[in-house]
Structure formats: C-alpha cells, structure tokens
C-alpha cells in the first residue's frame, strides 16, 4: 500500500527503512522523502514506525525471556 503518494513510497519501504535503523520521521524524510512535500503521509508513516519499534521491542523481550 502506498503511504506517500508524493514520493511513491509504500509501507514495505517504510518497514524496510525502520529495520535498517530509521527511528524518526526526520530520518525517514531524509532517506525516502516521506513527509517532505505535502505532509499528508506523516501520520501513517509515524504509525508504521511506531509499530515496527514495538514489534522489535516485543521480539527482543521474547528472546530475553527464553531460558538459556
Ligand atoms: S504524501 Fe507524502 S509528502 Fe505528500
């Protein structure tokens, strides 16, 4: 699904950028251009970034909770 129509950026690209280390809208804007033109995509892109952070934190917590 397209998140940013101005720059033709999809949710997959936003997730990939998050996995590659993008943690903020500023970083996402620099990397993919998201939110740097009309700004309508900002809320959705931010939600996806938060979701990715939450998923990675949960995966880490699960990993740490496993017995050695
Ligand atoms: S839709 Fe992303 S800047 Fe316009």
Image (cartoon, rainbow, N blue to C red):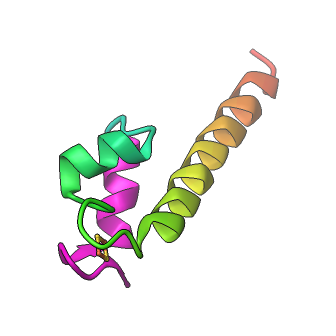
In front of the other: 11 or 67: 11
Q: Quadrant of the N terminus?
A: bottom left
Q: Is residue 44 above or below residue 29?
A: below
Q: Residue at x 78, y 27 (%)?
A: 66
Q: Residue at x 26, y 59 (%)?
A: 36
**Magenta stretch contains residue 49:** no
Return the residue found at the far front.
38
Q: Residue at x 26, y 82 (%)?
A: 5
Residue segment shown in magenta: 1-19
Q: Is residue 10 above or below residue 14?
A: below
Image quadrant of ligand 1 equals bottom left
| Total numbered badges shown on the rendered structure | 0
In front of the other: 16 or 36: 36
Q: Is residue 16 above or below residue 43?
A: above
Task: Describe residue 17's horizontal placement relative to residue 15 as left or right.
Answer: left
Task: Describe residue 27's horizontal placement relative to residue 41 as left or right.
Answer: left
Q: Residue at x 21, y 58 (%)?
A: 33
Q: Can you tell which quarter of the image residue 11 is in?
A: bottom left
Residue 19: x %, y % from top left: 39, 44
Q: Is residue 5 above or below residue 7?
A: below
Residue 45: x %, y % from top left: 46, 63
**Magenta stretch contains residue 12:** yes
In front of the other: 25 or 15: 25
Q: Quadrant of the C terminus?
A: top right
Task: Describe residue 6's horizontal placement relative to residue 62 as left or right.
Answer: left
Task: Describe residue 66's horizontal placement relative to residue 33 as left or right.
Answer: right
Residue 52: x %, y % from top left: 55, 51
């Amino acid at each position: 699904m397209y998140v940013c129509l101005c720059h033709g950026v999809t949710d997959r690209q936003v997730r990939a950028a998050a996995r590659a280390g993008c943690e903020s809208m500023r970083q996402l804007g620099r990397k993919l251009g998201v939110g740097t033109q009309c700004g309508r995509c900002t809320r959705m892109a931010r939600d996806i970034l938060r979701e990715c952070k939450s998923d990675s934190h949960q995966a880490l917590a699960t990993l740490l909770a496993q017995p050695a």
